[in-house]
Amino acid sequence: MNQKWKSIIILLLAAVLLAAVIQMGIGYEVYSRAERIHTEDNWTLESDSGEKTPVVLPYAYSGEEQKIYRFSAILTCQPENANAFCAFIELNHSFFRAYLDGEEIYHYTENDVPEAGHSPGNASVAVPLPDDFTGKEFVLEVWSALDSSDRCWIRLPEFSDYDTYMRRCFIESLPESLMAIILCTVGLILTAIGFFVSGTRYAFRSGFLGLFLVLFGCFSITVDRYLLYIIGNPYPVYLLNFILFAAFPLPLLRFLQDFVNKPLRKWYQVVEAIGIANLAVQCVLHFAGIMDFREMLSVTHGFDVVCVLLVITTLFLTNTDQNPQKRLVLLSFVPVGIGACIDLVNYYSRILPTESSTFFLQIGIVIFTFIHLWGIIADIFRTFRAGIEQMFYKQMAFKDSLTGLSNRAAFMASSEVINNHREKYSRVLCFCADIDDLKSVNDELGHAAGDELICSVACCLRNTYSSYGTVYRIGGDEFTGLLQELTVQEAEALAEKMYAEMKRTTSMGAPVHFSIGFSLMTRKDRDVSEAMKRADQEMYEEKRRKKQQEMQFEIDLNPKQESDCE
């Protein structure tokens, strides 16, 4: 079966599965019936003289007049079950009191927020209603938390049982919440890879993009209506909202400055310093009780506009020849700039009925992320591949191809490290080893037998001393080692055990014999080489002792052989 038919069959199976899921879902609702959520259209606004005039909610006002706005409506809804029935009220930078037939049933005032905060932010409150609320007058007294011309607003209150309304809030906020969670997840991965896994310039660039996505994703979560209703005190969410809003453009500037000409990068550094100063000053003024974050929001909006203009201007001034990625970056940033501008205009004009104040900016950032994500992943994989290749080639350069031990280059590098950091290597034991009569083995049995003998000696040395340090092959039949946590006596005792084991070992018919000498590096030694010279001398002393023993053995053996012959 060719690939074409396989693709067709997979598509058909997917279509059948989708149809089955849809069929099983018929008759089910995502949340309870819509008629369980009620609104009133008979709202009035009471003037100072007591006169009531019809009003349409949502309603905008400011704190300049320091006025209390009194909204009222006769509750006409008749729920099937009045248990856990609530009035769901959403206000922007405002306090309120709720009354039912003149009796106060809820309040959210200056006494309910910390003294450091002038404003509670966006308050989303579920006010419990008694069972017999139908036909009674519901009154909201609302006043601005700010003493400025900054606009505040109250949404149209909705009446429903708590479970039904919260399900609807969850479903309505789910797309933006999922978008925020995805941005945070991708951002955390990029941040971890960029700042903690790899140290290249490309990786750091992805780290800054990841940090930007994390900050913006967290900011998006703070405007989630479902979250605001769940949290009893909205003030911490309000703080995070404004702090993150002022902070998330900063890593984006650091990410984008790599795509412009070097002379233009200083402007990014200037704007970045302004952004950090803006965030620091706003935090100081807010927590000192001098000004509220909301009263300084226009400054942050101005900073965001400067960031957008800076990026677009510097990208246009950058030559495509000097930076081939310029067009892609400019194209990816256009949705971010357009989304930010639309949200900014809509924030002050309320032309578009969007639930989130950053809806279009979120869309722009998602497009921006997907455009860059593939290139970032490719850069990361290239970086890892280059690192692995470099590690492999370095390992090949430091490994002996015949025995698998470290080679002379590795020994020289290790010696250099010890020489430069003598305070960390106070007890270094050096040894030199050399195969006995390798030349005769090569002459009598061939070089293959000689190579096998070299590998056998390498295996003995590695098995005995590798747990204490590193064994090196520095020549044809010459070995050396740099060991720690061993004395000369302990090393010689291990060597004796090794010699005893070697008496039962042969390599292609040749006995495995070698000599070894040890020397402990002292403070008087200028470097490793001086200790190595002493170890080399000890090794040759060992060879001489062995030859003398062999000669004495032959002298003792010859008379005995002659007497046997007679």
Image: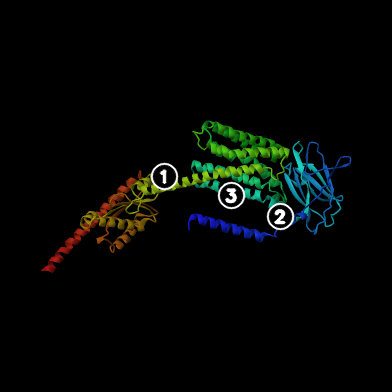
- Which SS class for mark 1? loop
The amino acid type, in three-letter code, at marker 1 is His
- Which SS class for mark 2? helix
- Disc nearest the viewer among 2 and 3: 2
Residue 365: image x %, image y %? 61, 43
The amino acid type, in three-letter code, at marker 3 is Thr
Residue 471: image x %, image y %? 35, 53
Disc 1 marks which residue? 421
User: Position of 537 compared to 181: left or right?
Assistant: left
* Residue 368 vs residue 72, the one in the foreground: 368
Residue 473: image x %, image y %? 32, 51
User: Position of 69 compared to 463: left or right?
Assistant: right
Disc 2 marks which residue? 167
Q: How would you rate the neighbour count of disc 3 (Cα within 10 Å): few for under 14, some for 14-19, many for 20 or more? A: some
Residue at x 62% of width, y 50% of height: 181
Q: Quadrant of residue 33?
A: bottom right
Q: How would you rate the neighbour count of disc 1 (Cα within 10 Å): few for under 14, some for 14-19, many for 20 or more? A: few
- Which SS class for mark 3? helix
Q: How would you rate the neighbour count of disc 2 (Cα within 10 Å): few for under 14, some for 14-19, many for 20 or more? A: some
Q: Quadrant of residue 10?
A: bottom right
Disc 3 marks which residue? 185
Distance, label 1 to label 2, CA atoms, is 65 Å
Compared to residue 247, the image places residue 174 above or below, namely below
The amino acid type, in three-letter code, at marker 2 is Arg
Q: Is residue 387 visible?
A: yes
Q: Is residue 230 visible?
A: no
Residue at x 33% of width, y 54% of height: 403
